[in-house]
Image (cartoon, rainbow, N blue to C red):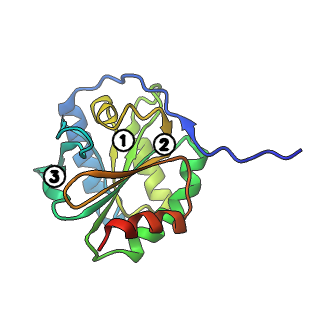
Amino acid sequence: FFLLPQIACNSQNKNVSESAKDLAANSELLAMNNANTNVRVFTISGVKSMGANKAADFTWTENGKTIKFSEYTKGKVVFLNFWGTWCPPCKAEIPDIIEIAAELAGKDIVIVGMATERPNDSNPLATVTKFAQDKKITYINFIANDAVKAIYGGIQFVPTTFIIDKDASIVETINGMKDKASFMTSIKKVLK
C-alpha cells in the first residue's frame, strides 16, 4: 500500500471578530515594517459583489491610501489563490506560484494570494506576514474574510485558485493543488 498525497485542506470557515479599523491600522503598520522585504499582506476593509461569476471587489489601505481591487486589477488577468499557512498542499504549491509571479512580471497579470487562516488564530495578519517573509512570497496577499469567501462560493477547501479574465469574469476554478505547468496552461488560455 502507498498513500496518495493530500491535495486540499478544509478551511473551517468561522468568524474571527476584530474591528475593521484595527485591522486596517495593523495591516498598514505591518506593510510599512515589511517594505524592505517586498512582502505585502493586507486586511480587507470592505467587500462588494460584482455579480454572478465575477471577481469580488474589495478595498484595503496601503501607504495611507484606500485601494480598490477593481482598480488595482483593471485590464489585467488575475490569478487568485485561496490558501492557508496551516495547509500542506497550499505550502507545496507556493514555490511554483512564486516562480509564476517572477516569470510573468511585467505582463498583464496580477498574482494574488488570499489567506484563509484558522478561526483560533488571534492575529492572522502577523501569521501570514511572517510566513510570507520566511517563504519570500513577493506577490500581494490578503487575509480572507467571510464576505470574500462567500462571493467565491464559500471556499470549503484550500487550495482553490480562480483564473479571472481582463473583464473580471471568473473563467476557471481550480480545486486542489496544482503544479506550475498546470497553472501556466490555465493562465495562457486567458493571457493573450
Q: How far apart are marks 3 and 2 (CA)?
A: 24 Å
Point out the frontmost of discs 3 and 2.
Answer: 3
Which residue lies under the disc numbered 2?
84
Q: How many residues crowd around disc 1 within 10 Å: few (fewer than 14), some, or many (20 or more)?
A: many
Q: Which mark is residue 15?
A: none
Looking at numbered disc 1 in the image, what kind of residue is underneath it?
Answer: Leu
Give whichever of discs 1 and 3 has the lower sequence position: 3
The residue lying at 40 percent from left, 37 percent from top is 124
The x, y position of residue 88, in whole percent, is: 61, 46
The residue lying at 27 percent from left, 53 percent from top is 31
The x, y position of residue 27, in whole percent, is: 26, 44
Instruction: Determine whether, in the image, residue 147 is placed left or right of residue 13.
Output: left
- The answer to the question of whether label 1 and label 3 lie on touching residues, with beta carbons closer than 8 A, is no
- The answer to the question of whether label 3 and label 2 lie on touching residues, with beta carbons closer than 8 A, is no
Looking at numbered disc 3 in the image, what kind of residue is underneath it?
Answer: Ser
Instruction: Determine whether, in the image, residue 188 is placed left or right of residue 27.
Output: right
Point out the frontmost of discs 1 and 3.
Answer: 3
Q: How many residues crowd around disc 2 within 10 Å: few (fewer than 14), some, or many (20 or more)?
A: many
- The answer to the question of whether label 2 and label 1 lie on touching residues, with beta carbons closer than 8 A, is no
Quarter containing the N terminus: top right
Q: Distance between the residues labelled 2 and 1?
A: 12 Å
Give whichever of discs 3 and 2 has the lower sequence position: 3
Q: Which mark is residue 125?
A: 1
Count numbered badges in the picture: 3
Q: Is mark 3 on a helix, strand or loop?
A: helix
Instruction: Determine whether, in the image, residue 91 is placed left or right of residue 192.
Output: right
Q: Is residue 187 above or below residue 53?
A: below
The x, y position of residue 102, in whole percent, is: 40, 74
The residue lying at 17 percent from left, 64 percent from top is 75
Which residue lies under the disc numbered 3?
70
